[in-house]
């Protein structure tokens, strides 16, 4: 299937898959649309060890081109090792996991390659695959359709457009367009939205006919973002946090959590404020166990690397006294949340992981420690007095990945 669908593996395809974060889920519909571009999920795989083994099999399939037959053997062994009772037959589940990840990673990688040459090859042509056993009439109808690369039609119809879809897109130059006998791009077909009840998620709107529920998004744009004019990008950057919209609203009550986080006793003691960035780096290395870098496994579900030099370079000296509290929260968080966010300017989706706890400093003071991580690395952190309850509760949103 790898050779048939996308020839040999390529860097952009591999990068797309390896940027994903493992996310235990009960059902495929726990995540929706572009969230799947940022997280590796297997429906029913709720244990990190099982998910990691399955991920390794998929990584081999993408990066090394292992066959479906080899994948099935590994799938069988992983299920037996972890005592996993999954839904559906072995052959069907293995083929679905294998095919879905190969096709989405391939198309995400192709999107990045295609947008990189959009100036010289600004037209994209939809291509229906003749290899599918039961072709979808809508996909056959889109075959040969030519639109500009930045036409909004691709936001919905960039393949794959459903389970087992093997459609693809190729780039065209102006000369290629003329060879096809076209003076310009075609007109985008009118969309026909519909509502479908999928049970585990209830009624959902699908943006056009011929697209399976949950597949009406552009996997490449979600993963990498759409290139925009420099001026527009600068405007979005200036918005900072307001440039992102949350796709996964969820609150503590949705997970049966208490309204307020408890105050934890801690052995962390405030340290003297560092006078220089070098002194800050030395403090961090000491707190990490006299090593320059350490990986923390948040709640046993999300690994995050902390590099002393990188953290020191981006840390205001006024915040250094709170470093012990940060390390304490990394080692033993009270909650870990995953929040899918989409950039309003480019359409790119990211999965930010947020961990937090409230620690008691002394008999009268307590401190909320919150930190964000992305792509397995610490992104930002803060420590504030926990008496600001509105701020505390605002941090607890998204998908609860771990709760003590």
Image (cartoon, helix red, strand yellow):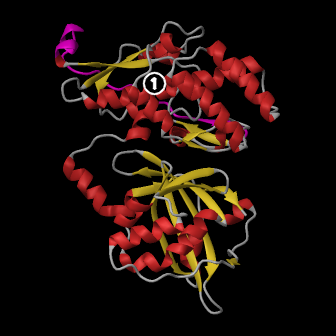
Q: Is residue 79 left or right of residue 372?
A: right
Seen at 73% across and 71% down, the residue is 258
Name the one closer to the observer, 392 or 274. 274
Residue 108 horizontal/vertical position (percent): 43, 30
| Magenta segment | 175-200
Where is 337 relative to 229, above or below? below
Asked if residue 265 is among those painted magenta in the image, a careful observer would answer no
Residue 112 horizontal/vertical position (percent): 35, 31
Where is 55 relative to 303, above or below? above
Name the one closer to the observer, 139 or 8. 8
Asked if residue 181 is among those painted magenta in the image, a careful observer would answer yes
Q: Indicate the quadrant containing the C terminus: top left, top right, bottom left or bottom right.
A: bottom right
Label 1 Cα neighbours within 10 Å, binned few <14 / some 14-19 / many ≥20: many
Quarter assignment of residue 12: top left
Residue 166 horizontal/vertical position (percent): 50, 17
Q: Indicate the quadrant containing the N terminus: top left, top right, bottom left or bottom right.
A: top right
Residue 119 horizontal/vertical position (percent): 19, 29
Secondary structure under tag 1 reads helix
Residue underneath mark 1: 106
- Residue 211 showing in the rendered view: no
Quarter assignment of residue 110: top left
Name the one closer to the observer, 203 or 67. 67
Where is 72 relative to 30, above or below? above
Seen at 21% across and 19% down, the residue is 173
Dominant secondary-structure state across the stretch colored magenta: loop
């Amino acid at each position: 299937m790898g050779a048939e669908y996308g020839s040999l593996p390529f860097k952009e395809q591999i990068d797309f898959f390896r940027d994903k974060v493992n996310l235990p889920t009960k059902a495929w519909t726990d995540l929706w649309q572009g969230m799947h571009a940022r997280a590796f999920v297997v429906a029913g795989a709720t244990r990190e060890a099982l998910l990691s083994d399955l991920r390794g099999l998929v990584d081999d399939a993408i990066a090394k081109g292992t066959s479906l037959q080899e994948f099935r053997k590994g799938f069988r062994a992983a299920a037996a090792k972890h005592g996993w009772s999954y839904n559906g037959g072995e052959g069907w589940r293995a083929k679905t996991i294998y095919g879905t990840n190969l096709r989405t990673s391939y198309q995400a990688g192709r999107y990045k390659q295609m947008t990189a040459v959009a100036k010289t090859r600004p037209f994209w042509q939809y291509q229906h695959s003749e290899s599918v056993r039961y072709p979808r009439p809508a996909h056959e109808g889109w075959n040969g359709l030519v639109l500009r690369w930045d036409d909004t039609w691709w936001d919905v119809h960039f393949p794959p457009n459903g389970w087992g879809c093997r459609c693809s897109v190729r780039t065209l130059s102006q000369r290629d367009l003329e060879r096809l006998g076209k003076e310009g791009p075609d007109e985008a077909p009118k969309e026909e939205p519909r509502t479908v009840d999928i049970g585990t998620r209830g009624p959902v709107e699908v943006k056009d006919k011929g697209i399976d529920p949950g597949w009406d998004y552009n996997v490449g744009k979600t993963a990498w973002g759409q290139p925009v004019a420099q001026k527009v990008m600068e405007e979005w950057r200036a918005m900072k946090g307001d440039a992102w919209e949350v796709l996964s609203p969820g609150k503590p009550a949705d997970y049966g959590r208490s309204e307020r986080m408890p105050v934890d006793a801690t052995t962390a003691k405030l340290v003297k404020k560092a006078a220089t960035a070098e002194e800050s780096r030395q403090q961090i290395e000491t707190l990490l166990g006299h090593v320059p870098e350490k990986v923390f496994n948040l709640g046993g579900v999300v690994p995050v690397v902390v590099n002393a030099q990188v953290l020191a370079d981006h840390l205001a000296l006024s915040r250094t006294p709170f470093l012990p509290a940060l390390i304490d929260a990394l080692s033993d968080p009270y909650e870990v949340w995953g929040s899918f966010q989409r950039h309003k300017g480019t359409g790119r989706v990211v999965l930010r992981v947020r961990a937090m706890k409230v620690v008691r400093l002394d008999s009268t003071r307590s401190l909320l420690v919150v930190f964000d991580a992305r792509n397995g690395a610490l992104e930002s952190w803060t420590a504030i007095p926990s008496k600001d309850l509105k701020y505390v509760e605002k941090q607890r949103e998204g998908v609860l990945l771990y709760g003590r």
